[in-house]
Amino acid sequence: MGDIIFHIPLANLFKSQGYEVGWIVSEKGYDLLKGNPCVDKVFLAPVQKWKKRGLNILNFFEYLKILREIRKEKYDIAIDTQMMFKTMYWMKFCGAKRRICAGNAKEFAQFGANEIIPSIMIGFHRHVMLNSFEFAKHLGLKTDEIKFTLPETSEKIKKEIDELLKDVDKTRPLVAIAPATTRELKFWDRDNWKAVVNELEKTCSLIFTGTEADRELLNYIGAERHTNLCGKTNLEGLRELFSRVNLVMAPDSGSAHLAWASGKPAVVAIFTCTPPTFFGPFGNDDKYAAVNGGIPCQPCGVKHCANEGENFKACTRTPTPAQILTIVNKLLKNNTTVEK
């Protein structure tokens, strides 16, 4: 989800300066782009379906069908923003006159391009979204606007969220807690989450989100005492939920990125092994915070901790609950309007 969200501002740069935009996306990002004003045409590549089938000739024929649809558009420019082996084939055969990739692309992705720009990701000091603007600069576009757009929420989903939140005390600040993510080392310590929940529940109305796979974690940190939407919202519902709360707390995850893109709630994103400057929300210090514990091995970016003893997974235990609560309370003061 983050890959899609971080490149929506790039698509909006092209749209605002007279370009028509097409986007190839897999199932995970399709709902973020279908109906999104940043794009004129969305091509769905059903990667998850293809993976489930395994080696199957049907996958190849479906790939060719999508490729023919893309080639019919006769695009002038193709940009590989993900820059991986799986995107190289789309670039190579999409039919665009200019196929642009960066010099530091991974997995031989450059072989799909006929135009290479300098490396755009050097270290972790600049956000991945701003890195993507190098494509626009290369093409002579203005890059002084960061604009997120998301599809309109359907009335059906709005009513469903109305029902799910009907018993929430809206005279208190509304805080959505989404503690789960996709990689084990990116999880903040569950006892830290529990300590934060124990304090916030004294002054805030708490709403918990996650998938069915996250239910045990949510129950452990206290979700059952509050509004627990585990497994009850799809991506569209999550967007609508975040538009109604004052603050969202999450690790480095799709939930944190979606909350930032919505532009509505304050966001506290807790980072462990990944770099907050590269993936975290930014733009307004009174509204967004991307934090880690500042320990020497951060950020490592690895999937499995190489430390041993007391330093094993040390990043997942920092910052402390007290440090996070200080940040949360500061942002809530700046971003809370409650019903009287």
Image: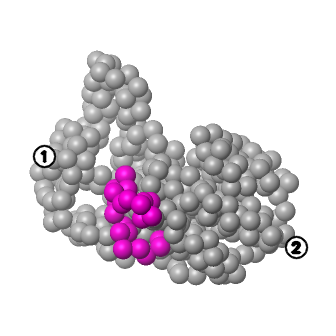
Identify the residue at the far top of this view: 57
Q: Is residue 295 magenta?
A: yes
Please, is residue 61 above or below residue 13 in the view?
above
Identify the residue under disc 2: 340
In this view of the protein, which residue sits in the foreground, 228 or 218?
218
Q: Amino acid at mark 2?
A: Lys
Q: Quadrant of residue 175?
A: bottom right
Q: Quadrant of residue 125?
A: bottom left
Q: CA distance from mark 2 to mark 1?
A: 60 Å
Residue drawn at x 45%, y 38% as measured from the top left = 27
Can residue 59 be seen here? The reply is: yes
Magenta stretch: residue 44 in it?
A: no
Q: Which residue is mark 1?
A: 111
Q: Mark 1: few, some, or many residues within 10 Å (few <14, many ≥20)?
A: some
- Give how far across and how far down residue 163 sits, in percent: 80, 47
Among the two numbered marks 2 and 1 on one chain, the one whose residue lies closer to the N terminus = 1
Q: Is residue 254 left or right of residue 224?
A: left
Q: Where does the image place residue 270, in percent across and percent down from the top left? A: 52, 66
Q: From where the camera sits, is residue 278 visible?
A: no
In this view, 151 is above or below 176? above
User: Does residue 55 appear to the left or right of 89 in the view shown?
Assistant: right
Horizontal side of residue 93 vs 124, given as left or right: left
| Majority SS type along the magenta span | loop
Q: Amino acid at mark 1?
A: Phe
Secondary structure beneath disc 1? helix
* Screen quadrant of the C terminus: bottom right
Residue range highlighted in magenta: 292-313
Q: Quadrant of residue 202?
A: bottom right
